[in-house]
Each structure stands twice: as structure tokens, then as C-alpha cells.
Amino acid sequence: MVGIRRNELGAVLGFAQRQMYVYRRYWVWEVVWLFYSIVSVLSIGFLASGLGKLGAGGAGFDLHRAQLYLLVGALLWGYLSLVFMEAAYAIAWERWGGTIEYTFMAPVRRMTHLMGICLFAVVYGLVRTFIVLVVAVAIFDIDFSHANIAGTLVVLAAATVPLIGLAILTSVLPLLSPQKGEQMSFAVQGFMLLVSGVYYPLTVLPAPLQVAGAASPLTYALAGMRRSLLEGAGVGEQVPTVGILVGMGAVLIPLGILVFSWAERRAKRLGLLKRSG
Amino acid sequence: MPARSVSAIQVCGVRKSFRRRERDAGAPFWKIAAPKDKVALHELDLVVEPGGITGILGPNGSGKSTLIRIVGTLLTPDAGTARVFGWNVVTQALEVRRHVNRVSVEAAFFKELSPWENMVYAARLYGYTGVRSRVVEILESLGLPGDAIDQPMKQLSRGQQQKVAIARSFLTAPSLLLMDEPTTGLDPRSKKEVQTVLERLRAEREITVLLCTHDMDEAAALCERVLMMDGGRVLADGSPGELCREHGASTLEDVFMDLTGKTLEAEELEEAPT
């Protein structure tokens, strides 16, 4: 039993290490994506700076706070969407590499496979977001003196749990449809951007989208991290948010694994593993 | 290591068909085509005892790759049961996978990664340590130049890629090796090199090999036992010598002609994608 557990742990590291090797080979692509991430965040930052010129700086409007609100949203969305897409592409990577049958024949549990991909996604997401953060802080002179870093990190860690569950659910799509699954992952990501309050409060949305937003873990993650970064909310004040996020994760991860297992059985019944188009 | 008294492969009444929707030529885009079932395997029975190389011969579409995939837990049979060393391929798939590895015609690798990186990945999945000296030793024993170990796979020839695939399977020490057309598409020299590796494998290791091929000469040279398949059915089963004697033929190609009334080459041309 201990031997099996050690093998599974080794396999988790194996998947994470393989992703690292792949990204190292595609380092030019990664530089391009990093540049794109930086440019996206800077655009949002300059948009916020331009609000004053557009006449948004009237009474009762805190321009500096609006800038921070948007920048924090852009930075956190950069991290959360990156982790989500990396994990959601667990199967897409195998299809691109032509290795899907080899990986599915390996003596590891699917949970192990997916956790390995998620481990890399989280580490890679943190590294890339840190670089973007450094650039953004340097250019916009962001003042985080009131921020509570511990509270932020606790919410960030808790947010990763339901995010992984959502990503596993989305990674099923290329198994269900070899031709259209990958594109559907983008559609899910786009919808989360719309309803999760990344750049605006949920209250500006129509009621049905507010309901969808209330079901998105990213909504709570973004709100919680903004409270810590902008208002200095400490770990103690974040307990309800952490509870919601971990609770959502406790539902979404097992649900994701269950749905994935069902999709894998279906793919084996219909002969979809081999098909790449 | 599985018990020697248990059959390496035991397939009872396995049936597999695939449902596909194929739009008729000229049909309007909004018209959904009716699904059609294509039977890949018809109630197949097969027992393979441990050790040696068993060949599965047949043209494209004969069902041999479907059989390999079922044994390798990549496909679920519609009916019947398949066992590997006594473990059911559907309900005990994880146990089966611990003892099986597969070398396929596609040489499934991350082509941007090097042989070393692919081997480290494989070793971790199978619970082994990817020691570089051991990997180098295996690759060199297969005739791969030492400097190839850190080159991206895509820069290696198809023959070299297949050797890395075989080396990768050695690294994980399988009891059953499924080889799905490992020499298809290789140039004659690479093909010969891979066949030489298989001959050495048979001589040196306690391993059961199931070799799918449509190369009759390859099967005659390497296999102790040969099953001829066509249209999802086993048409003949025996050693190459027995089959030739029974059908009064000098080659396995002639045996196939005698059984089906068609040549394997004609079948390949008929089934080649356009």
C-alpha cells in the first residue's frame, strides 16, 4: 500500500515534470504569452488611469481605488485563468502530443494524472503572475501598504481548490468531443470572466448573470483577495470566504473526478481515445 | 511478477463494434446522418500462454489493433471478457496496466522532448527511477547513438524513434508487451534493426509479446505462433510452418490468399486513406 502511494506520488511529480520539460522546449511561446499577459494587465492599468481624463473623477468617485480595483482584478484573473486553462488542457496536451493512449495505459489513477497537471499549473501560474505583478507595481506605483498579505495568500490558496475542480470538469470536454472540446474550454473561461466580477461588481450584471456569478468560486476568490489587498482584511476576517471556497472545492473536485471517470469509460466504449480529429 | 500458471492473455467471446455517423455525399449540411455500426471483432476467443512472440496478422481493418487496445485497457469490449494474467481488463484495469506496455506504430512521444525526458516521464509513471546510466545503457544496446539521448525526438529518424519506444518499454519491465505494427512505415534498414531488437528480446527476456503486423515475412521470421485475422475474425491459428503445411503454401502470404481469396497487398490498397 505504501509502495503504491509512493508510486502515485512519483507519478504526480512525473506529470508535473513532463509539463515543465514541454514548457522549457516551447520557451519562446511562453515568452510571447508572458508578454501578452503583461500587456493585458498594463492595458487595464492605463484604462484605469484614463478614467480621470474621461471625467470619472467626480465627487464620490475614488479614482485611485478604482485603479487598484481594476489592476487587482486583472492580476488575479491572470493567475486564476492561467491555472484554470493549464489544468483544463490536461487532455488537450495529450492529444496534441499523440500520447493520450500511452498516458491512459500507464498504471496510475486518473486523480494522480490530473493532480500532477494541476500541481504544475499552480506553480507555473504563481511564477508568471509574480513577474507580471513586479512589472505592474513598477509602472503604476501601486500602494499595497494597507494590504494584508497573509489574508491574500490564504484566500489565494483556498481559491485554487475549487478552481482545480472546475478545471477537471472542463478538461473532460476534449474527451467528450475530440474535435470541439478544446474550443469549448475557451467558452467556459470566457463565461467565468463575464460573471465572476473580475472588472466590475456583480451588481451591474443582469439578474440571471448575477445568479451565475454567485455560483462561480472565482467571485468569492476575487472579492476576498480585494478585501485583503485594498482594505487590509486579515486571515480571521477571511474565514467565511475560505469556508465557501473550500466547501465549493469539496464538491467540485470529487464531482470533476466522477465526471472524468464517466467520460473516460465512454471514450473507451466509443473508441474516442485514438481519434484526434 | 504474475504467476506462470496463469495465461498471459485469455479472451472469451469478445465482440466490439464502432458506431459512426457518415454523411452521404451531396447530403445537405443540416441533415443528420443515421449511425452505422461497423463490427471490428466478432465473438473472439483467444488464449496466449506466457512467453514467446505471438503474431496477429491481417490487413487494415481486420480487428488486430482493436484486439490490442482491448487487451491494453484502451477499449471496452461490447460483450465477452478479456483477462491479462488473470486480471480483467475492464474491472481490474489498474492491475493489468502494471504488467503491460505497448509499442505502437505512432511511437507515442512528446516529439519536442528528448529520449531522456520521455524516458524519465515513463519511469515515473511506472514507479521506476529514471537513472541516466541505465537509460543510456538500454539505448546503446539497441544501437542508438549516445548523442541522440538529448536531442528532440522529432529530430530522430522513425527507426530511431521506434527504438526509443522499445527502450522505454524495457525500462518499465513489462510482463506483456503489445507491439502494434512497430515496423510499419520504416525504411528497410530501420525495419531490420527493429526486428533484430525483437529477436534479441525473445532470446534474452522472460516476456510475452503480442505482435500485430501485416508484414507476413516479419511474422514468419519472429513468431512462434501466428493468428490470421480478417474482417474481425480469426481465420487460422498455428505456427508459421504448420499453417504453410496445412494450406500447401510456401509463404504466409499464400496462406492468407488461400483463406480469403485475396492478397494482403490488394487489401492494403483498398483500405488506404485517400
Image (spheres, coloured by chain):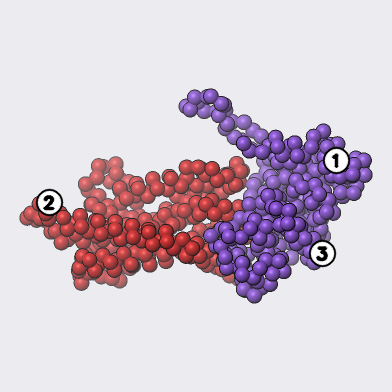
- Front residue (pair B189, B133): B189
Dots 1 and 2 on the same chain: no
The crowding category of the residue bearing disc 2, from other C-alpha atoms within 10 Å (few below 14, some 14 to 19, many at least 20), is few
User: Given the image, what chain letter belongs to the residue carrying mark 3?
Assistant: B
For residue A54, the mark is 2
Circle 3 residue? B203
Viewport quadrant of the C terminus of chain A: top right
The hue used for chain A is: red
Q: Are marks 2 and 3 in contact (CB under 8 Å)?
A: no
Q: Is residue A118 above or below residue B73?
A: below
Closer mark to the observer between disc 3 and disc 1: 1
- Spatial CA distance of label 2 from label 3 is 81 Å
Q: Residues within 10 Å of mark 3 (few under 14, many from 20)?
A: few
Query: Quadrant of residue B1 in the image?
Result: bottom right
Above or below: residue B187 compared with residue B139: above
Mark pair 1, 2: CA separation: 85 Å
Amino acid type indicated by mark 1? Asp
Circle 1: is it few (<14), some (14-19), or many (20+) Cα within 10 Å?
many
Which chain has been coloured purple in this picture? B
Secondary structure at numbered mark 3: helix
> Does label 3 lie on the same chain as label 2?
no
* Residue wearing tag 1: B254
Q: Provide the chain ID for the residue under circle 2.
A: A
